[in-house]
Image (spheres, helix red, strand yellow):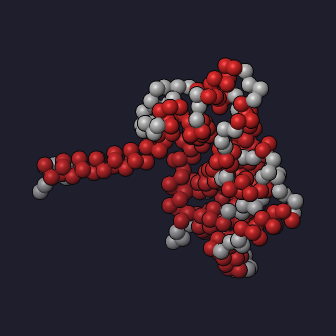
Amino acid sequence: MTTYGKGIGAVAANAVILIVLLSIAFLSLFPILNSVSVSLSDKAAVSAGRVTVFPVQFSLANYKTLMSDKQFFVSFGVSLKRVLLGGSIQFVLTLLMAFPLSRTPQRFKGRNIYMWALVIAMLFSGGLIPWYLTVRAVGLIDTIWALVLPGAVPVFNVILLMNFYRNLPKELDEAAMIDGAGPWNTLVRLYVPLGLPAIATVTLLSVVGHWNAFFDGLVLIHNPHNMPLQTYINTFLLQPAQLDNIDPEMLKTIMQTSDQGLNSAKVMVSMIPILLIYPFLQRYFIHGIVLGSVKE
């Protein structure tokens, strides 16, 4: 009987698998490595397209210019505010919708009607123009609320958390009822602690979604002081007016930067909050996705 993993054929197969996986990993990491290299390269090298994986003619001019860009940090603060405010609203509303929808139709009358409404809302949107007209009609244009309220109920997250709760043993719910726990106590003391993997998953999806969103800021925000970071990065170009009234040393630094290099530096800095959050939620992520994706 042949031992698994022994022999030339097994070694060759493992080598091929390793090469394929390393190639996929490199292709996945290449855009990030390229952005890092571009942000740390000289303007001439970037403009000539000579930068790939490693910096060419190492330069910190892009980051020096970034540190002097007040609008970047204003937009950074707007995005942080959006994540905290929008993520909190989505967390509360997702939890309050998923819990009752995980009940049976006998316990929650009209559950199926609400479920069909959610599914239809997820499959068919109202359209861009009605969305904009609605936001404008309620007076949210150019405010932080225009960025958080239209997407306050993420239907996919609700369904994910609802299916996770439906997979929990029904005996737990029955035991809570016997002990005299009402719906609020059952939710807070039983379902929230047991649902941490799924809650961490939907929280991560919500945070990343808010942080990376740029289109709604492009359409709904007109004042630069209310513009989120990704919208600012997406629309940024060095303007001649920005070079007026700047001290000669700073002007020299700015002239050593390019739009591509400066935007790469901004992308790198904007990735830091997500990179800090993800390691703490990553261990829950796959577990929550798998358990919340299918109802047994």
* Camera-nearest residue between 249 and 15: 249
| Residue 163 lies in quadrant | bottom right
Q: Is residue 60 visible?
A: yes
Does 259 appear above or below 115?
above
Say whether residue 262 is left or right of residue 30. right
Quadrant including the N terminus: bottom left
Give the x, y percent position of residue 194: 61, 56
Say whether residue 204 is left or right of residue 42. right
Q: Residue at x 52, y 62 (%)?
A: 291
Q: Residue at x 15, y 52 (%)?
A: 9
Give the x, y percent position of residue 162: 63, 66
Give the x, y percent position of residue 56: 44, 30
Q: Residue at x 13, y 55 (%)?
A: 2
Does 41 appear above or below 279?
above
| Residue 126 lies in quadrant | bottom right
Q: Is residue 176 visible?
A: no
* Camera-nearest residue between 266 and 98: 266
